[in-house]
Amino acid sequence: MASRVPWSLWLVGVLALLWHAGAVMNLMMQLNPSALAQMPESHQAVAKARPFWATGVFGISAITGVLGAIALLFRHRVCGPLFFVSFLAAVITVFQAVVTGGALSAFKGFELIFVVLGPVVFGLFLVVYAHRARKQGWLRGAAVE
């Protein structure tokens, strides 16, 4: 039996949608040479150093995150697996950016926290939140167990 859905589900869903839609827009800007040229040099350097496969993984993270947020807003259980895939892809993307992409030397201060830690921390939060929402009975759909 489903319990009453808290207001936080809608807040988290909207924030997740905005965050991941921003990631999709960021990806599209990075793939457009004229838009990339308008970005700060630190962002340009990291984007240009990123291999094609890592750009694909970044896209997977952004798109599955958008789909997970939409699923969460529709209260569907598939949001959990989608957020998990998005989180794993974000970890891979951030790992590549830090290890071979020069992110630690390119980004400073808040930019480093927002660009490097943000996707991993927020992604983990969404995975945990979706799991909690499923356990609390806030989500509908076939159980994925």
Image: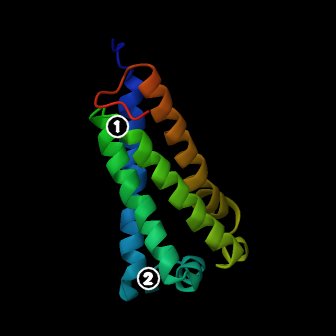
Q: Nearer the viewer, residue 21 or 56?
A: 56
Residue at x 70% of width, y 68% of height: 108
Residue 13 horizontal/vertical position (percent): 37, 38
Query: Which mark, residue 36?
Result: 2
Query: Which mark, residue 114?
Result: none
Q: Nearer the viewer, mark 2 or mark 1?
A: 1
Mark 1 surroundings within 10 Å by alpha-carbon count, few (fewer than 14), some (14 through 19), many (20 or more): many
Q: Is residue 27 left or right of residue 51?
A: left
Label 2 to label 1: alpha-carbon separation: 32 Å
**In the image as oriented, which residue stretches furthest toward the front?**
145
Mark 2 surroundings within 10 Å by alpha-carbon count, few (fewer than 14), some (14 through 19), many (20 or more): many
Display colour scheme:
rainbow
Kind of element beneath mark 2: helix
Residue at x 47% of width, y 68% of height: 57
Residue 117 horizontal/vertical position (percent): 64, 55
Kind of element beneath mark 1: helix
Location of residue 100 with respect to 132 vertically, above or below: below
Marks 1 and 2: in contact by CB < 8 Å? Answer: no
Quadrant location of residue 98? bottom right
Residue 123 horizontal/vertical position (percent): 53, 48
Location of residue 86 with respect to 101 vertically, above or below: above
Location of residue 125 with respect to 45 vertically, above or below: above
Q: Nearer the viewer, residue 123 or 35?
A: 123
Residue at x 35% of width, y 31% of height: 10
Q: Quadrant of the C terminus?
A: top left
Report the residue marked by disc 1.
72
Q: Is residue 110 left or right of residue 78?
A: right
Residue at x 56% of width, y 67% of height: 93
**Residue type of the residue flagged with mark 1:** Leu
Residue 92 horizontal/vertical position (percent): 58, 64
